[in-house]
Image: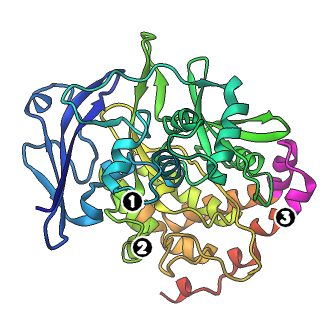
Amino acid sequence: MTSEHECFVYIVLPGQTKFVTAGRFRISEDRGGAVRGEFVYGRSYLRRNDAVELDPTELRLSTRVFETARMGGFFGAIRDSMADYWGRLVIERHSGHTRPEEFDYLMEGADDRAGALGFGLNVEPPAPRRQFNRVLDLGRLQAEAAAVVAGDFAHGGPDAAQVQELLLEGTSMGGARPKAVVQDDHVLWVAKFSRYDDRWNNPRVEHALLLLARECGLSAASSRIESIGGRDAILVRRFDRNWSRNGNGFNRYRMVSALTLMQTDDSQAGRVRWSYLLLADEIRRVSASPREDLRELFGRICFNAAISNLDDHPRNHALLASDREWRLSPAYDLTPSPVVAIERRDLAMACGPAGRLASKANLLGGAGRFMLDRDEAEAIFDRIAEQVRASWRATMRREGVSEQDCQAISSAFLYDGLFLERSAAIDV
């Protein structure tokens, strides 16, 4: 072997607040460049009556040694716990290296990463984190985030400790925007900041879209707006955390992305499997309430088409387990994509027999995969489309989005092609 890395994998069990050691992860590369990942559950963990699986696809509870050569040797549930684009940028700024190894991204990531997993070199897990930045710290955090974006921080520099504070806040499913985790009373929020190159007030637009989704009868993350020094930040409540009933810390919920459920990745080859239809099949297999979750997922596809959320990739969908059972998580990371085309727009994932085409005909063509008949699916589509058409602008204005910004994003909402029946779906 030319290289080998190994760590222990910890998990916070349902209803608990402290990590226990679940198993061991090893990744190795031979002289020919072939990479293999291995994971094995610990014997003492498997003997626990409250032991739970790391994910419902690859790593079910078993005494076997799991192996994978996919995704550079990283199992999906472990990859979901790794830093996203923003977290990786912070790790790079902090370490001074522009290209750390993938294993470094895993180990340098936050203790408070998304989901219930943790990683370390010692068999005994660390104590869970108990102190977080407060809402009152948002001004400082926003300034530090802006400095990271600008590349002003360097390893060992005077602000390295501040970079470390942001490093502790990275989550793996929050996208590329600068962010930090803050605590308000016994609630954790992901604070997502404005950027200097934003084309509109992203925090207020995202907040309004989350509200609009709920007005359409969908399950979406709770959010609020905080203004700091004349700039806005959106605070999105973390749905993978909940203050424990006995008051001794946060319960952590297991969380896996749609990438993991569909056993695919971000590569060009992996994108062939980016499909709401395949995701529906997996949800039907693993969800504790598949009919309810599939109905919800179909509604979100309709909503994404209605607002031209063309960033609806598999990392922006997840399953959550607050106990032993897996359910579809609330919607998050909703973004409009105003574009010029008025006759055709594609979602990030295939949504019907005509592929990624975001038209009513194509969406209804795949209704059966969501355990819906055509009449049920059409009723859901029409209700959501009409709600968006009737209230998107009023919702935006009510939540403080300027008229200028409304005009900038207006072409995202209910473009003409959404209702065109002349699509490939009709001929399938």
Spatial CA distance of label 3 from label 2 is 30 Å
**Residue span colored magenta:** 390-407
In the rendered image of this protein, does residue 23 appear above or below residue 297?
above
Q: How is the image coloured?
A: rainbow
Asked whether 246 or 42 is in front, the reply is: 42
Label 1 is placed on what type of residue?
Leu
Report whether residue 217 is seen.
no
Check disc 1 and report the residue beneath it. Answer: 259
Residue 145 is inside the magenta segment: no
Spatial CA distance of label 1 from label 3 is 32 Å
Secondary structure under badge 1?
A: helix
Secondary structure under badge 2?
A: helix
Label 3 is placed on what type of residue?
Ala
In the rendered image of this protein, does residue 178 appear above or below residue 409?
above
Residue name at image x 65 percent, y 82 percent: 421
Residue 74, horizontal then vertical, whole percent: 27, 56
Report whether residue 100 is seen.
yes
Check disc 2 and report the residue beneath it. Answer: 271
